[in-house]
Image: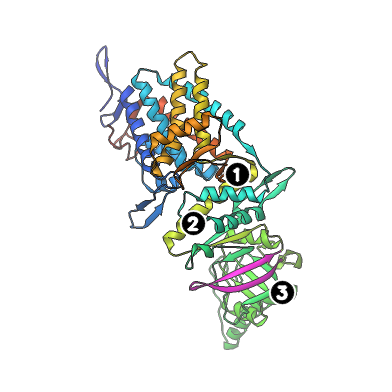
């Protein structure tokens, strides 16, 4: 509808005819309903007993996952408020890697509880103030609750990695995979003073179907999904001296169009021989410096391949730029643009370069590098769907281990910190005498949605479980949470279910900010395309 105001000289048309507008409570309710629906979508995926979703895109490609961020990324959400919920999961995924489902479920719960207060005529500004105060207090409670660990304590890191895998398809193989993940992170972690930093760019992940998940391995070096360019070249070289070249090993074509007029057949022969001589000179230079492995980012001429094979140099071409950078870090070599600049000090060093068959393809493995600051995880699994989900799970696991190394503080999992923070917040709310007290109590109730959902997804009775959980926590057992695997209440620290404090903090921050932003909206104006309007699209029908 168009927005029409009655002016002194008749009606005034403010918006164009095709514009849609929703005001006040209608707009709020519509936005809250959309956000709650998004939370409902991923709710059944939370926790170790959470179920997977099968997503089919327009091309018929199938994705099977229970990763909140992946589910919301794959479904094409149209409603503007729902898109804000999708953004929460993206933010949490990019920042800390895990907790994407929890953040969306918590954000939806915050809005559901706010809706109850809005129906009682509590103003949205009051709810927002209460929520922000509660979020700050919750972060304080988490900080007091957290347990400091040593950043290089391998045992603690393994517990973190295993916990992050418990809610995934790969939970049965978490022992093997967690060791692979922790080894990879510790290989690339760099220490600065007392703190550590980890650049996940230094961990290359290669996927290949075949074998089982148990066959996933860490290669202390780089795996290139390319084969050696010439059948006459050696397929295995020990004590490799590696040249990294990012220009083509070919005769360069001239920039301008030109032609050569030949009057004598011998001139043609000389022309071809000169081309061969130039390529031979390039290869001879590599051989003279001591190169026995050449990794090239661009093409290698057929004649050059022949000369390389004669000198016993193993060569790989058309390697990705990101792999060249990783190879530079791992082997200590320098990526060279011009062959004339290459000297012996620019060469990388590795103990072994060999070609190996992985399923039906031949790949080149560069192992035992001089500075193994780059490593490769080679993921195996029964089918492509399984491998894709293993890849997503390993990404989450790498992220949480990185989080702990960079900020070495942990809390128990299984909804224990949320439940503890909720009971503390309820007591703290009594110190407020205004309506914020109601908002803080509702915030605490929303926090309890996380342990409640974990219990529901494990098939436990939610009412009995929450009553039991509160009773245990009130007795001072602050690490009590929901052991969904064994469907009972347990001390989560005792059974090694631990998570990084950074993940928990990010869930609180992202969900609270998104909920407050949605609660602030009291007017939605959607202008669809047409003459004088913004480009097509606009907003889907509301209400």
Span of residues in magenta: 348-369
For residue 196, above or below residue 132: below
**Mark 2 — residue?**
172
How are the residues colored? rainbow
Q: Around disc 3, counting alpha carbons within 10 Å, would you say few (fewer than 14), some (14 to 19), or many (20 or more)?
A: some
Observer-nearest of 293 and 86: 86
Residue 90 falls inside the magenta stretch: no
Tell me the mark number nearer the camera, choosing from 3 and 2.
2
Residue 178 on image: x %, y % = 57, 54
Dots 3, 2 in contact, CB < 8 A: no
Using the rendered view, name the quadrant where residue 237 is placed.
bottom right
Tell which residue pokes out farthest to the top in this image. 8
Using the rendered view, name the quadrant where residue 228 is placed.
bottom right
Observer-nearest of 413 and 518: 413
**Going 68% across and 48% down the picture, which residue do you hit?**
152
State left or right for residue 131 relative to residue 233: left
**Going 53% across and 65% down the picture, which residue do you hit?**
215
Q: Which label belongs to residue 171?
A: none
**Mark 1 — residue?**
403
């Amino acid at each position: 509808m168009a927005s029409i105001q009655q002016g002194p000289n008749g009606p005034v048309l403010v918006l164009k005819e095709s514009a849609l507008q929703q005001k006040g409570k209608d707009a709020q309710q519509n936005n809250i309903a959309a956000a709650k629906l998004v939370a409902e979508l991923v709710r059944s995926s939370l926790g170790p007993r959470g179920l997977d979703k099968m997503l089919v895109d327009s091309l018929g490609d199938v994705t099977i996952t229970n990763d909140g961020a992946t589910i919301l990324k794959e479904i094409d959400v149209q409603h503007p408020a729902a898109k804000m919920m999708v953004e929460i999961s993206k933010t949490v995924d990019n920042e800390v890697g895990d907790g994407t489902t929890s953040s969306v479920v918590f954000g939806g719960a915050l809005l559901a509880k706010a809706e109850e207060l809005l129906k009682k005529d509590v103003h949205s500004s009051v709810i927002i103030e209460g929520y922000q105060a509660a979020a700050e207090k919750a972060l304080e409670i988490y900080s007091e609750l957290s347990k400091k660990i040593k950043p290089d304590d391998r045992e603690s890191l393994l517990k973190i990695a295993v916990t992050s895998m418990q809610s995934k398809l790969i939970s049965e193989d978490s022992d093997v995979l967690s060791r692979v993940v922790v080894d990879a992170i510790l290989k690339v972690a760099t220490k600065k003073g007392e703190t550590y930093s980890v650049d996940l760019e230094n961990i290359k992940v290669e996927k290949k179907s075949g074998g089982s998940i148990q066959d996933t391995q860490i290669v202390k070096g780089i795996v290139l999904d390319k084969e050696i360019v010439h059948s006459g070249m050696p397929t295995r070289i020990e004590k490799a001296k590696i040249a990294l070249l990012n220009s083509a090993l070919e005769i360069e074509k001239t920039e301008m169009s030109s032609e050569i007029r030949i009057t004598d057949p011998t001139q043609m022969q000389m022309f071809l021989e000169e081309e061969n001589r130039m390529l031979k000179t390039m290869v001879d230079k590599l051989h003279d410096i001591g190169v026995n492995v050449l990794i090239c980012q661009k093409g290698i001429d057929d004649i050059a391949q022949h000369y390389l094979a004669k000198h016993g140099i193993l060569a790989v071409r058309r390697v990705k730029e990101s792999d060249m950078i990783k190879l530079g870090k791992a082997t200590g070599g320098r990526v060279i643009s011009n062959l004339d600049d290459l000297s012996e000090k620019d060469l990388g060093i590795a103990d072994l370069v060999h070609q190996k068959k992985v399923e039906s393809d031949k790949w080149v493995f560069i192992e035992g590098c001089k500075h193994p600051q780059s490593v490769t995880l080679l993921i195996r699994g029964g089918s492509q769907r399984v491998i894709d989900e293993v890849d997503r799970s390993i990404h989450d696991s790498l992220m949480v281990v990185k989080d702990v190394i960079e900020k070495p503080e942990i809390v128990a999992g299984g909804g224990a910190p949320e439940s503890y923070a909720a009971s503390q917040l309820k007591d703290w709310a009594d110190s407020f005498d205004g309506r914020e007290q109601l908002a803080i109590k509702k915030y605490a109730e929303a926090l309890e949605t996380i342990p409640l959902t974990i219990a529901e997804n494990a098939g436990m009775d939610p009412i009995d479980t929450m009553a039991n959980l509160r009773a245990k926590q009130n007795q001072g057992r602050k690490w009590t949470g929901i052991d969904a695997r064994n469907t009972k209440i347990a001390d989560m620290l005792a059974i090694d279910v631990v998570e990084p404090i950074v993940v928990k903090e990010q869930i609180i921050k992202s969900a609270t900010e998104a909920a407050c932003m949605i609660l602030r909206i009291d007017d939605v104006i959607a202008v669809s395309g047409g003459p004088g309007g913004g480009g097509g699209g606009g907003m889907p029908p509301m209400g």
